[in-house]
Image (cartoon, grey):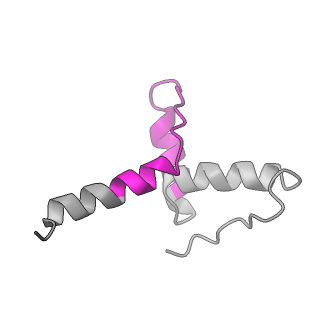
Amino acid sequence: MAKTNYEIKKTSNERYAAKMEIVSLRVPKGRRDIWKQAAAGHGKSLAQYLTDLVYADNPDLFPEKEVSSGDK
């Protein structure tokens, strides 16, 4: 029996989630919106913007990673 579209997506999402970790961050109210505006100004999502900042600030820890240019 063929898998339904839901089952295919669920399996794909589970494989993706197994490779990732969740990082949670608490900031003062209103700060998130400011950070999102800054990220949007660079053409990036907030997650990508913060990730790129960490990579740029620690090139010795991530020599294989290059900061994205914001192209999507």
Query: How many discs appear?
Result: 0
Residue 30 rendering spot, x and y as whole percentages: 45, 31
Q: What x and y, as percent, mark residue 14? A: 37, 51
* Residue visible at 52% across and 26% down in the picture: 26
Q: Is residue 66 above or below residue 23?
A: below
Q: Nearer the viewer, residue 57 or 17?
A: 17
Q: Report the front residue among 65 and 48.
A: 65
Q: Position of residue 13 (x, y in %)?
A: 35, 55
The percent coordinates of residue 1 (x first, y second) are: 10, 69
Q: In the rendered image, which quarter is residue 41 located in?
A: bottom right
In magenta stretch: residue 20: yes
The residue furthest front is: 1
Above-or-below relation of 51 to 22: below
Residue 29 part of the magenta-drawn span: yes
**Residue drawn at x 42%, y 56% as measured from the top left:** 15
The residue lying at 49 percent from left, 74 percent from top is 72
27 lies left or right of 53: left
Give the image quarter of residue 56: bottom right
Query: Which segment is the magenta one?
Result: 13-39
Task: Work out which residue is located at the far right of the displayed protein and give it.
Answer: 60
Which residue is pictured at 16% across the width and 59% down the height? 6
Q: Is residue 27 left or right of residue 33?
A: right
